[in-house]
Structure formats: structure tokens, C-alpha cells
Image (cartoon, grey):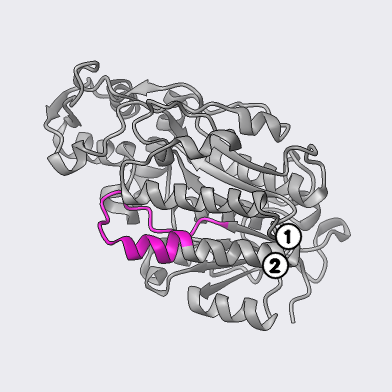
Amino acid sequence: MQREPVILVTGSNGFVGTHIVEALLKRTWGELLSPGARPRTASLRFSNFEEQAPGGDCPLMVVGVDLAATASRSNAARFAGSTRYRFLPLEACEAALADGSLSPAAIVHNGACSSTVETDPSVFASLNVGWSQKLWQVAASRSIPFLYASSAAVYGDGSRGFSDSLEDCANYEALNLYGKSKLDFDLWALEQVRTGNPVPPAWFGLRYFNVYGPFETHKEGQASMVMHGYRQVTREGRMRLFESNDAKYAAGEQRRDFIFVDDITRYTLELLSRSLNGSLPEDGRGLFVNLGTGMARTWNELASHIFAAVGLTPRIEYIPIPPSLARQYQNFTQATHGGLQRAGLSPAFTDLAQGVRTYVQRYLVRGL
């Protein structure tokens, strides 16, 4: 039987999930409940605690959940040395939740199929919608917070804006099956609220914009352009960007909202902390929250920062967008921050040049 408070993190062997697990393992339970506080145990990283954490604080356990096939990823071995971390394959997690042997204090749900080129609707129906519904119902029935990864892909071509207001959710039309699955679950969650079905005491649909940062190599073609650009620059001395498929944008001048993964992690833990300690505003306990910087930047700007991080003069080649991708390509994204502000948080994000430099010089040069 578990003794310490447990946070359940799905997608734990994935990109964002591994960062959330890492951040949680650097904290005690008391530190997690103190929003904005720098964890005293951060220097311990994944070290084991004794029966009691420093100062008599309660240890914090993390249960990571992912598909069994992800066990071969390098991310899967990152926390193996900690007695405060336990990994469960998806099927085993379902069984443990059902029989009561796993009783989390909160669920952070990042597990999903994130491929924007996947064409099998059943994959999204099962993982992105069905599994999310099951976890929502677990959180609602046990009255625990539920934070899950939505996506800026719900906004489609951006012509209807990027408002994360609950009232605007039904206005959007995604451009691919991935975005549609995220929007479908967002709408389902709203339906539970509106029809009076059980809902978690605090819930947040976190709409990620273009996330970049370490531990994404397993995403291969779906990894950020920072990773791909770095590889092209260091191997070929040049970087390839798509030509424009819209007369409003010159080649490489399409604009995206790029966010460093550390900012995703920081806001996730801040919302989790406030959900657990009861400090959320009355009207801030069930929201969609855009996690983007609020500043759209061009691909050319991003490329210039990658070249600068490795000390080379920019050399960019523009290539046609594949027809299959052109139909679902977002030429512009830019977050608004209504959700963050309604939750009582102030938007503050890593500068793009700084984030790219950190990622390239501290991680990509080491293969992370």
C-alpha cells in the first residue's frame, strides 16, 4: 500500500512528460504545495529520500505511465535510480486505478498520440479521447485535480483567433486528426461541466503551442525545428525551411509562437500546486490555458538564433511544402493569456534567443 502522496503523470517517457516527472522528483510534498517556491531539494535531483524528507516534510511519489513500447526510449531510464518513482505500462495503470492499489492525489495527463501526420482515426479515438475520458472520470470520482495536454492545433488556421475562453471553444475547426482529437476532448470536458456530470474539483486543458527543448529526440519527424535545424546546420552548414503556401507570407516568414519546455513545466507545476492547496480563484478552477509566449516569431528568426548558438553565419535553403502537409499547415499562431490570468498567474516566458541557446549549447551538443 502506498504511504506517501502520489502524483500520476501519463506520457512519462515522452517529451513534456519527462520534464514534469523530473520537476516533481526535485520536490517534497510541502514544496509542491508552495506555489512559486524554489524547491530546497532541487540539488538532490532524483536522489532517494529517507522515511522523512528534509525538515520532516513528507516525501512525494511519482507514478509514470506510458505505452509499454516506450520502454526502449532513453527517457524511460532517466528516473530508474529513484525509489520515489514507479513506472506502470498503460494497461497496468488502468488495473491499479480500478482495484484501488493506486490512489493518486492528482493526475497530470500528457500521454497521447501527438503525430500530426497520423491518418488512423482509431488511434486518436482510443488514446487522445477515450483514455482522457477515463482519467477525467477517475479524477472526478475521487475529487482530485486533473491537468491535461490539449494543443494549439485546436485553433486550426487561426482565422478565428486563439482565445482560450471556455465560451469560444466550439468556434474552432482543427486542420488534422490530431488537432481534432484534442478539440473533441476539450468539447467533451465542457459538456460534462454544462450537463452537471461529475467533474474534477480543479481541471485545466493546457494548450501547448510550438514547444522546443531537450529530451524530444524520440519524436523524430515530429520533433521541434530547433532540433532538426541544429542537426542540419552542424552536419551540412545550412538549414532548410518551407517555402510559403500563402501569398501573405514570404518564404520563412510564416509566424509561430515558440515556447521553451521549461516554461511549460513551470506553469504546469504552478497550476498543480494551486489546485492542490486550494489557492485558485473561484472562477479559475476549470479552464483552458494557452501555453505560448504570446509573441509570434518567424521561422527565419528561429533559424538565425540556431546559427548564432553554434557560431555560424545563417545559410537557409527554402523547399516546397509537401502537398499532404500544406493542407493542414498553420501559417500563424500566437497565444492569448486569458486562461493564465483567470487562474491568477502572470505571463512571463523565456526569450526565444535565450531558450534556443540554452537548448543547443547545454543539451543538443550532448545528444539530449
Q: Residue at x 30, y 27 (%)?
A: 331
Horizontal side of residue 247 vs 51, given as left or right: left
Q: Residue at x 52, y 48 (%)?
A: 187
Q: Amino acid at mark 2?
A: Pro
Measured from the top left, where is residue 35 in percent x and y? Answer: 76, 41
- State the CA–CA distance, disc 1 to disc 2: 8 Å
Above or below — where is 90 with respect to 207?
below
- Quarter of the image with the N terminus is bottom right
Q: Which residues are magenta?
A: 109-129
Q: Residue at x 36, y 50 (%)?
A: 178
Measured from the top left, where is residue 275 in percent x and y? Answer: 74, 48
Label 2: which secondary element = loop
Tell me, yes or no, whether the two marked residues, 1 and 2, touch with CB atoms within 8 Å.
yes
Q: Amino acid at mark 1?
A: Ile
Give the labeled residue for mark 2: 104
364 in the magenta segment: no
| Figure label count | 2
Within 10 Å of the Cα at label 2, are there few (<14), some (14-19), or many (20+) other Cα atoms? Answer: many
* Observer able to see residue 228: yes
Query: Which quadrant of the view contains residue 166?
Result: top right
Label 1: which secondary element = loop
112 in the magenta segment: yes
Give the labeled residue for mark 1: 144
Out of 253 and 204, give the one closest to the viewer. 204
Which dot marks residue 162? Answer: none
Measured from the top left, where is residue 245 in percent x and y? Answer: 18, 26
Out of 283 and 267, give the one closest to the viewer. 283
* Observer able to see residue 212: no
Which of label 1 and label 2 is nearer to you? 1
Q: Residue at x 41, y 44 (%)?
A: 363
